[in-house]
Amino acid sequence: MSSETHHTQEHDHAEHDTMSRKKIWQVFFVLLGITVIEFIIALYLVPKGIVPLTIANPIYIVLTLAKAFYIVAYFMHLKFEKIGLMYSIIVPTLFIIGLILVLTNESHHWVDLR
């Protein structure tokens, strides 16, 4: 085995040391907890009228964004990447979300014209 191949294998192994089994299970239980909260809201609190839908929808959005953060950060290993790569993914995503919000607002204007 050449020293270059050995160095590459060590580098690959070092990259994946950041996610231990304990950390994977911690992230799993955080995601499970968020999902359970979403199900409780959707299947119990909203149908019983305890939480109105106007309050539940923003809560769903925040919880879904939290789940997306955990998935992207840990399972897609973005948390362990360089800051430049993170910004190259996060900034365009924020612009797309902003564009969606603006277009959604504009769509209401066109519906009101009918």
Image (cartoon, rainbow, N blue to C red):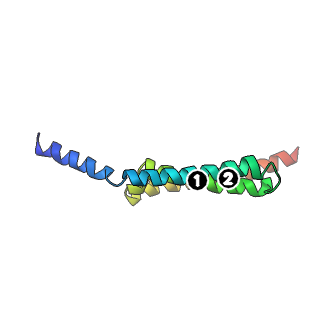
- Dot 1 alpha-carbon crowd within 10 angstroms: few under 14, some 14 to 19, many 20 or more: few
Asked whether, in this view, residue 20 is left or right of residue 43, the answer is: left
Name the secondary structure under disc 1: helix
Any part of residue 95 in sight: no
Question: What is the residue that sits farthest to the left in this orientation?
Answer: 2
Tag 1 residue: 33
Question: What is the residue that sits farthest to the right in this orientation?
Answer: 114
Residue 79, position in %: x, y?
42, 56
Question: Is residue 88 or residue 110 the one in the foreground?
Answer: 88
**Amino acid residing under circle 1:** Gly
Q: On the rendered image, what quadrant is the N terminus found in?
A: top left
Given contact means CB atoms under 8 Å apart, are the residues at marks 1 and 2 in contact? no
Tell me which label, 1 or 2, sits earlier in the chain.
Answer: 1
Nearest to the eye among marks 1 and 2: give it.
Answer: 1
Figure disc tally? 2
Question: Is residue 7 or residue 91 the one in the foreground?
Answer: 7
Could you tell me how far apart the alpha carbons at marks 1 and 2 are, in whole angstroms? 13 Å
Residue at image coords 69%, 57%: 59
- Dot 2 alpha-carbon crowd within 10 angstroms: few under 14, some 14 to 19, many 20 or more: some
Q: On the rendered image, what quadrant is the C terminus found in?
A: top right
Asked whether, in this view, residue 85 is left or right of residue 68, the answer is: left
Residue 50, position in %: x, y?
80, 57
Residue at image coords 58%, 53%: 33
Asked whether, in this view, residue 49 is left or right of residue 14, the answer is: right
**Amino acid residing under circle 2:** Tyr
Numbered mark located on residue 60 in the image: 2
Question: What is the residue that sits farthest to the top in this orientation?
Answer: 1
